[in-house]
Each structure stands twice: as C-alpha cells, then as structure tokens.
Amino acid sequence: MNVEIWSDIACPWCYIGKRHFEAALAEFEHAAQVEVTWRSFELDPSAPAEVPGQSVELIARKYGLSHEQAQAAEDRIAQTAASAGLDYHLERARMGSTFDAHRLVHLAKEHGLQDAMKERMFRARFIDGELMSDSDTLLAAAVEVGLPEDEVRSTLASDRFADAVRADEQTAHELGISGVPMFVVDRQFGASGAQPPELLLGLLRHGWESAEEPAVA
C-alpha cells in the first residue's frame, strides 16, 4: 500500500502530522507493507531566500492580527507540538524559501533516506531555528543523515530535482490539494491536516480493506 504525504518544511502542522502518522503506522497491522513517499508542497512558492522579521510579526501582518493574537496562535501550535513530543522554538524561526530543501528530500529518496532527511529538515526549522534556504545549513543536514557530500553540493549548485518538486506541486493541484499536510492512500483516499493518530490509523485500515476487496464484476 502506498501513502503519499504532501507537506512543506515551513509548515508547523506538517511536523506534528508526521509524528501523528508515525504513531498511527506503529499501530497498523500491515505497517511493513506500507511504502511512504514524501511529496513537495510550498506554502509560498514566491518566498525569497529569507523573509526578515520574527514569525509572530509576520503572522500578525499576514492575517491582520494583533501581536497578542499572533503570539497566542503560535503558543497553541507549540502546545500541540509538545503533545506530540516535539519541543518547538518558534521564536527562533527564520522564514524563507524551502525550494532547495525540497530538492534535497528528492535526492534523499534516491538513497533510501527520504524520511530521515524530512525529519532533519523539520527539526532544523522548528526546533533549531535554522534558515532552510541556506546552502551551508542544507549541506550539513544532508551529510548528517548520510547523503554523499559531493552529490549534495552538486545538487545545490544546479537545478537538479527542480522538475520533481514542480511535478509534485502540479499533482497536488490536480488532486485538489490546497493545504498541508495531506495524507493520500493509493491515490484513492485522503486526510488533510495534522489529524490525530487514531484518525490516520482509520485511514490506513480503510485503504488496506478497500484494496483487499474483490473487484465487482
């Protein structure tokens, strides 16, 4: 059974969703037969390399909130993350493009390290407060999870996997995906948002049972 997860490294709910999905998969009876693929999605494809300012200020400006309202929203996210075992430090967050980070996730897939790369990127973004468009930061993260340094350098210095990122985003558009995280089972069933583990477990079981049903003549 194939599960595709569309997400953005800049999306705090996507890291929470990853933890919830992992909890669901740990309870799923057929977990060994599930292939998980991380798909690219940029919340802001036009984002520059770095957007100056603290995240709470940017959120307030983007959604027309007061500083207090924006801070309360970030606090709620951090509390939800904590319940999933994640120690968010959103006050450290540095905003900017995630395009190159997505390209490295595609490179990691070729080496069987996609999940590890995604995990490392999320940690860098939401816990360590690293800028995910910075080449040195991306290189260090990729090498840490086991990718060959020379290949990472050559990928960052080229447009390799740019088409793969765009293809994922085009597929998301065709499937009507407008928000992330989005969990899709065998391109038939989906769940949007950082749903609780029990709901994602239900999605997995439903997908498995549907695949097992005999075709109707």
Image: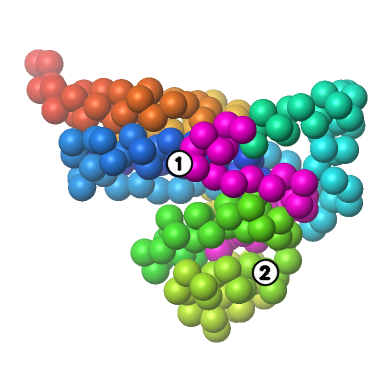
Q: Residue furthest top?
A: 217
The residue mark sitting in front, 2 or 1, is 1
The front one of 197 and 72 is 72
- Using residue 118 as the reference point, say whether residue 21 is left or right of it: left
The front one of 146 and 217 is 146
Occupied quadrant, residue 213 = top left
The residue labelled by disc 1 is: 19
Identify the residue shown where x is 43% and y is 55%.
115
Q: Are marks 2 and 1 in contact (CB under 8 Å)?
A: no
- Using residue 23 as the reference point, say whether residue 129 is left or right of it: right
* C-alpha distance separating marks 2 and 1: 23 Å
Image: magenta residue range = 79-105
What kind of residue is marked 1?
Arg
What is the secondary structure assignment of the residue under circle 2? helix
What kind of residue is marked 2?
Thr
In which quadrant of the rendered image does the C terminus lie? Answer: top left
What is the secondary structure assignment of the residue under circle 1? helix
